Image (tube, helix red, strand yellow):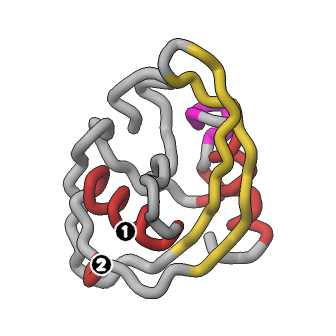
Amino acid sequence: VRGVEPAKGKLNMPGGFCELGETFEATVARELQEELGLSGEDFGPLHYVTSVSDTYLFGGENTTAMGVVFWAELKPGVKITPGDDVVDSVMVAAKEIDFDGLAFNGDQLAIKRLIELGVI
């Protein structure tokens, strides 16, 4: 659950912006640590799913952001600890997802692709 604008209070997949010189995979690991308190030992291998283009309010202006979507399995017993711009973490079954309650169009596209692939 996002704790900051844009889309404060809405559901959002973990993610963020790549830093200069950072790979997508390193960005995923860093964002999972910052937002959910996960270390690289807490999840299995990353699997590429798709890319999405979305509008994102940044610095008071709408900008286009490219998202690269990966999935990974959490290892048994891993505890999620919300941090950074996350106020809560929830697990929702695919059939129970309220797509209107998602923060961004990119989240909707990514989750629909995960469902199509049978990942969730």
Q: Total number of numbered labels? A: 2
- Residue at 63% of width from left, 60% of height from top? 68
Give x and y (percent) for residue 84.
25, 41
- Residue at 30% of width from left, 50% of height from top? 35
- Would you say 85 lies left or right of 8 here? left
Labelled disc at residue 40: 2
- Residue at 61% of width from left, 47% of height from top? 97
Q: Where 75 sits versus 70, above or below?
A: below
Residue 28 appears in which quarter of the rendering?
bottom left
Give x and y (percent) for residue 86.
31, 40
Give x and y (percent) for residue 99.
67, 39
Give x and y (percent) for residue 10.
48, 31
Magenta range? 98-103
Is disc 2 in contact with disc 1, using a CB cutoff of under 8 Å? yes
Q: Which secondary structure, mark 2?
A: helix
- Would you say 10 lies left or right of 95 here? left
Q: Label 1 amino acid? A: Ala
Residue 57 appears in which quarter of the rendering?
top right
- Residue at 49% of width from left, 39% of height from top? 11
Residues 16 and 82: in front is 16
Query: Which residue was labeled with disc 1?
Result: 29
Question: Within 10 Å of the Cα at label 2, are there few (<14), some (14-19), or many (20+) other Cα atoms?
Answer: few
Q: Label 2 amino acid? A: Gly
Q: Where 18 sits versus 39, above or below?
A: above
Question: Within 10 Å of the Cα at label 1, are there few (<14), some (14-19), or many (20+) other Cα atoms?
Answer: some
